Image (spheres, rainbow, N blue to C red):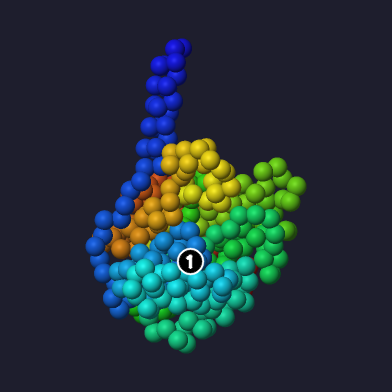
Amino acid sequence: MSLLGYIAAAVGFYVFIYYTFLRRTRCKSLVKLYGKTAIVTGSNTGIGKATALALAKRGARVILACRSRGRADAAVYDIRRESGNQQVLFMALDLSSLQSVRDFVQTFLKTEPRLDFLINNAGVTGEGRTREGFGLEFGVNHLGHFLLTLLLLDRLKQCAPSRIVTLASIAHYGGHIDFSLLDQTKDVVTERKLLKRFWDYSTSKLCNMLFTRELANRLEGTNVSCFSVHPGLVRTKLTRTMSGLLAAVLSKLFFLEPEEGAQTTLHCVLQEGLEPFSGRYFSNCALAQGSAKSRDDALAKKLWEVSERLVGI
C-alpha cells in the first residue's frame, strides 16, 4: 500500500472512531432552573464540576456532594464566581461509607426543602474496599448511589416532575455480575482475576444501567423519571501525565473536555419530553442501545433485591 493509501486508511479509521465514540454533541435546551435544586455527586472536579457549573448558570441551587471539603470549597468558589450564582454549596458525602450516605441525606432533608434533580455523577476506579468491606468500585459506583437515591426518593416525588441521572459508561458492555461471588467476597470479581480493575469498573457500570432500568419500573406513575448516560471518552489524568506534542494530539483527537462530557447529562436533566424514555440509556445527547444484559429486567430486579439487602433496606 502506498503512503497515500495508509494516510487514507488512517483518516477513515479516525472518522469511524469519531462518529462512533467521540462526536462532540451539545445539549440544546434553553431551560432556566430558578427555584430548582440539584444534587451533583463528585462535583469538585471533571464532569461533575462542569455539570454543576452549567446548572448554576441556569439559576439552580446546586449542592456539591463530595468527599473532600478542601477541593469542594475551591469548586464552590469557582462556580459561584463564573456563574454569578451564590446558591452553590458543599455538603459532605463519602460514597464509600453507607453511614456517610445516611448522614448526608439526613442533613440534606433537614436543611433543603426541595430536590428536583439528583445527578449520580461520582465514580472511582482502583483497588480497595469500602468502609463496609465491599469492593471499592462496586461499593462506590453502585451501592453508594443506590442507597443515596432510595433515601431521597420521597423528596424527589414531592417535588415532581423531577429527574435522576446516573453516569454509566459504554464500558458496561464488558460487565458481568456473579451474585454467588458477591455473597462470598462482597465483590464482583475475584482478587486474583486477570484484568480485575477493568471487570470491576465495567460491572459497576452495568449495575448503574440495571439500577436505572429497575428504578424506572418502580417509579412508574410518580412523575419522577430516570436515565443512565455515557459521557464519552473524557480527558483524564492519563493525558495530563503525557507531555509535548503527543499529549496535545491525543487530547484533541480522542478525548473530550469535561464540559463536553457533561452535555449528555445536561440533556437528560433539561430536555423537555424525555419522560416516556425513563429507564433508558443516552449517549451523545440521544437515545442509545445498551447491551443485552443491561436490558434484562429479571437481572435488574435481582440486582435491586440483592442491593437492598446489602445496604440494609
In this view of the protein, can residue 233 be seen by the observer? yes
Q: Image quadrant of residue 12?
A: top left
Number of numbered tags placed on the structure image: 1
Mark 1, residue position? 43
Query: Is the residue marked by circle 1 packed among few (<14), some (14-19), or many (20+) residues within 10 Å?
Result: many
122 with respect to 55 (left or right): right
224 with respect to 200 (left or right): left
- Position in image of residue 153 (x %, y %): 44, 74
Q: Residue at x 33, y 58 (%)?
A: 267
Please identify the quadrant where the C terminus is shown: bottom right
Q: Residue at x 44, y 15 (%)?
A: 3
Instruction: State the residue lying farthest toward the top.
Output: 1
> What is the secondary structure assignment of the residue under circle 1?
loop
Q: Residue at x 68, y 70 (%)?
A: 131
- Position in image of residue 149 (x %, y %): 48, 70
Instruction: State the residue lying farthest toward the bottom.
Output: 110
- Position in image of residue 86 (x %, y %): 37, 78
